[in-house]
Image: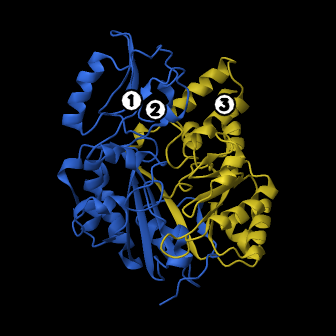
């Protein structure tokens, strides 16, 4: 049974935050603190004044990692139905949730993983993904918007089925819906493609916005392998001051039917 | 999604870390593909992967493997983790011969994966490079913690859990092997490499 203060809080959260965030039932919690290290946002804390374990609702990204770890001996971690815009936290943070707009579990798209059959990244084109908040830091959509708007100035084409693109009010400028900007998620991926010769100006725009954000991002680029100049995108990235990692992903081309080349 | 990309580490550490996974395109060849994942499983499990899992059901450390085998769906993404490129080459060769028609992706050191493909007469189609981490890198933990955490691309393995478990190892409350398994449980898809995690945890706690 949820204690009275939780009920009062829940009315506040439903009205103000759009649903009841993950919370700890204080009547059940035995303060063993087993859940605390599992939280990637360090949003679970022991409040020594109140002598209670609490979740900071502003920092919680609704990933359910604490609950799914099954370390609470009393099942005191409670998740109830989330409403807009807070439900975005769950959709972008819990990979067990299949995103309603992509049909794919997780927070991105199939991107290069199925490029052998979809032909999404064609010869001469480069796909880029900027995963805001990764690794392990999380991001507000306000920072996602800053980066999206910066790269949009270089004239990129945002992936229409990407969950971040769907939240844009203007896909030319990268502007996001105003009511989501303070929502925090574990990560959010800005995805787009462009002709290979736009890679350098986009990377320059990206560098210019780095001092303005309060989180990290992981950056990647993907392209169809071609004879001869398959390392061109890597050379451009190096010229723009980005170091290319030795490891990466290779779609080995065994999918069928193979996408038709233009 | 890039959930197997951006794994941090040097050449020596990454040379024991390869993921082979199968996926179908929801708009092209997904319909009826669940049985293809079973065929994929039949091949990869012969080579004793260090981890195995399906995004839709879980991994071999947090669910009985029979549940994974019963749970394949048309939008599954099925992963197997291996520690050496010789095995990767053998698995790729069998997958090529089986001609399952589903997309196969290998994550790992790109030059090594390219050699595996070349050796087995496979022509890679598309490549994805990591260009590193940028922004407030001062928020990040030390390299060892980062190497372990980035083995789960969905961020399910928190920095604080790794730090907590390394403290528990130092206090002799848990073994390195047990800690690595606890971490592997967190990564639902099964792309976490517990053998590599053991190696890093040993370095952290010696």
B100 on left or right of A162? right
Who is closer to the viewer here, B199 or A200? B199
- Which image quadrant for residue B37? bottom right
Who is closer to the viewer here, B59 or A165? B59
- Which image quadrant for residue B106? bottom right
Could you tell me if the residues under marks 3 and 1 are in contact, i.e. CB atoms within 8 Å? no
Q: Residue B74 in the image: state x and y as whole percent.
A: 57, 64
Q: Residue A147 in the image: state x and y as whole percent.
A: 29, 57
Q: Residue at x 30, y 53 (%)?
A: A144
Mark 2, Cα crowd under 10 Å, few <14 / some 14-19 / many 20+, is: many
Q: Helix, strand, or loop for circle 1?
A: loop
B41 to B127, vertically: above or below: above
Q: Residue B81 in the image: state x and y as whole percent.
A: 69, 53
- Which image quadrant for residue A246? bottom right
Location of mark 2 (residue): A39
Q: Colour of chain A?
A: blue
Q: Chain B is drawn in which colour?
A: yellow
The answer for which chain carries disc 2 is A
Q: Can residue A133 be seen in this view?
A: no
Mark pair 3, 1: CA separation: 22 Å
Location of mark 1 (residue): A43
């Amino acid at each position: 049974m949820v204690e009275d203060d939780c009920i009062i809080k829940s009315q506040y959260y439903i009205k103000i935050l759009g649903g009841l965030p993950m919370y700890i039932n204080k009547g059940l919690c035995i303060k063993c603190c087993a859940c605390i290290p599992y939280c990637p946002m360090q949003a679970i804390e022991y409040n020594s004044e109140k002598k209670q374990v609490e979740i900071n609702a502003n920092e919680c990204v609704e990933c359910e990692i604490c609950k799914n770890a099954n370390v609470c001996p009393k099942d005191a971690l409670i998740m109830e139905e989330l409403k807009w815009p807070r439900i975005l936290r769950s959709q972008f943070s819990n990979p067990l949730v299949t995103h309603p707009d992509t049909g794919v579990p997780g927070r991105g798209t199939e991107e290069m993983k199925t490029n052998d059959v979809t032909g999404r990244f064609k010869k001469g084109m480069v796909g880029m993904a900027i995963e805001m908040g990764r690794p392990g830091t999380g991001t507000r959509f306000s920072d996602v918007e800053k980066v999206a708007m910066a790269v949009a100035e270089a004239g990129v084409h945002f992936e229409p089925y990407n969950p971040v693109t769907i939240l844009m009010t203007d896909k030319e400028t990268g502007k996001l819906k105003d009511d989501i900007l303070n929502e925090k998620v574990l990560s959010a991926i800005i995805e787009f493609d462009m002709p290979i010769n736009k890679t350098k100006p986009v990377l320059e725009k990206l560098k210019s916005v780095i001092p303005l954000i309060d989180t990290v991002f992981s950056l990647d680029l993907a392209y169809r392998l071609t004879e001869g100049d398959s390392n061109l995108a890597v050379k451009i990235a190096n010229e723009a001051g980005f170091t290319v990692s030795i490891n990466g992903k290779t779609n080995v081309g065994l999918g069928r039917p193979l996408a038709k080349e233009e | 999604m890039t959930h197997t990309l951006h794994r941090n580490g040097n050449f020596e550490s990454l040379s024991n870390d390869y993921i082979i996974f199968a996926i179908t395109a929801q708009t092209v060849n997904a319909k009826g593909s669940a049985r293809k994942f079973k065929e994929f499983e039949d091949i990869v499990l012969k080579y004793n992967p260090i981890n195995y899992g399906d995004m839709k059901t879980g991994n071999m450390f947090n669910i009985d493997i029979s549940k994974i085998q019963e749970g394949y769906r048309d939008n599954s993404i099925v992963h197997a983790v291996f520690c050496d490129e010789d095995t990767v080459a053998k698995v790729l060769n069998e997958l090529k011969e089986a001609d399952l028609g589903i997309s196969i992706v290998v994550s790992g050191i790109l030059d090594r994966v390219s050699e595996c493909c070349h050796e087995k007469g496979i022509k890679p189609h598309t490549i994805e490079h990591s260009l590193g981490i940028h922004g407030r890198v001062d928020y990040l933990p030390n390299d060892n913690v980062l190497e372990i955490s980035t083995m789960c691309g969905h961020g399910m393995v928190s920095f604080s859990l790794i730090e907590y478990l390394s403290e528990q190892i130092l206090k002799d409350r848990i073994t390195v092997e047990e800690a690595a398994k606890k971490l592997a449980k967190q990564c639902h898809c099964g792309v976490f490499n517990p053998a590599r995690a053991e190696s890093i945890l040993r370095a952290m706690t010696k």
